[in-house]
Amino acid sequence: MLTQNIKLLGIPFTYGQDKSGVRLAADVLRKYGLVDMLSELAPTQDLGDIGLTIPKSNSVYNGIKNEVESAMASQRISKFIERENLDESFLLNIGGDHGMGLGVLHGLLYQRPDMVVVWADAHGDINTPESSPSGNFHGMPLSFLLEGAQNRETFNWLSRTLPANKLILFGPRSLDAREKEIIEKLSIQYYSSAEINRRGSSAIMKEALNKADPEGKCPIHLSLDIDFFDSEDVISTGTRESQGPEFEEVFFMGRALSETGRLASMDIVELNPEIGTWIDVDATFQTAMDFVRYTLNGCFRDNLNFNSKNQLEYVQIAN
């Protein structure tokens, strides 16, 4: 899939959990120079932020906190993306919590119905409302994408679903019992952090994409929760987990995806500038910036060589 330009979209979705700071992430990254950095790679259009001003009630209905707000905001996100011209565009979405994934992927499925989704996260995010121990919507978006509205009136606008064989769960290490059952029942590709560290991101990603898309023709979407990184590598996020992938392996995953030539969109979610010291925030947001630069450089420029933690060197490969 040929992408000629980049479109940046802020999605201040906060309904999936109780930490409001995630709404600020897109603007913080802009202050860190995200737009200028993207513009060095390809013509870039900043679409601004989707207006999500629905007040949070913090009510729980049938197992979901903020169900009505989550459903309304997800529909708004989906409609926006459905209507955006993405024919030659790479779409970069900055969250927001990972609950926004429902609206993003639902909208993208209208434009790219055959896409493969790589969900890189410390958690499965595949609980149903009935199985969720917390009721937090950011742990449920994949269940709605796989199964649709699930007999809930608030989600009856859902008209697209993601085939289970097009989903790759990358790096979960905190799965609830019901999530494990769903993964097994639907034969969803699942690669733990331990396996990533043992076999390497690049080899695993090549294997996973071959299974999901044997002909190598489908566009790819990466949805990256910053807590995919090990808890020692990122601080400013709400649900950190230890025993994550090695720092370099996260970047190697991005490179492996960009080298396919089919990576067409990406989310960065759960960055929270209200968690940790200013040093923690700076380190976490710089890591996010480095990951975006490293991955998108592979899409729009020369190959890269990753030297060491928080140090990226651009290396032109001779023809």
Image (cartoon, helix red, strand yellow):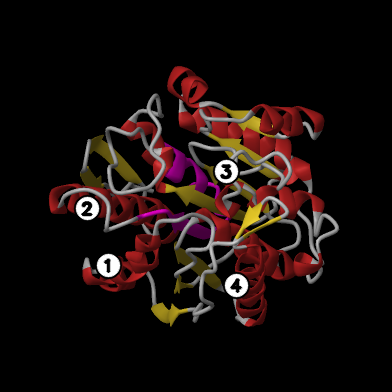
Return the x and y of residue 209 as percentages of the image width and height: 64, 39
Q: Which residue is mark 3?
A: 134
Residue extending farthest to the right is 151
Asked if the residue at tag 2 contacts the one at tag 3, i.e. Cβ–Cβ closer than 8 Å, the answer is: no
Q: Is residue 162 left or right of residue 57?
A: right
Residue identified by numbered label 4? 73
Quarter of the view holding residue 308: top left
Query: Start and end of the magenta stretch?
Result: 252-271
Q: Position of residue 20 (x, y in %)?
A: 39, 62
At label 2, the amino acid type is Val
Measured along the vertical axis of the image, is residue 5 above or below residue 209?
A: below
Closer to the N terminus: mark 2 or mark 4? 4
Dots 1 and 4: beta carbons under 8 Å?
Answer: no
> What is the CA distance from the residue labelled 3 to the residue labelled 2?
26 Å
Closer to the chain start, of discs 1 and 3, is 1
Identify the mark nearer the N-term, 3 or 2: 3
| Residue marked by disc 2 | 281
Badge 1 or badge 2: first in the primary sequence: 1
* Tag nearer the camera, 2 or 4: 4
- Look at mark 1 in the image and give the residue it sits on: 28
Question: Of 269 and 275, which appears nearest the observer?
Answer: 275
Most extreme residue toward the top is: 198
Q: Nearer the viewer, mark 1 or mark 3?
A: 3
Distance of label 3 from label 4 (alpha carbons): 20 Å
The span from disc 2 to disc 4 (Cα, nearest Å) is 27 Å
Which mark is first along the chain, 4 or 1? 1
Report the amino acid beneath label 1: Val
For marks 3 and 4, give the one nearer the viewer: 3
* Image position, residue 250 (x, y; %): 40, 38
Instruction: Report the amino acid beneath label 3.
Output: Ser
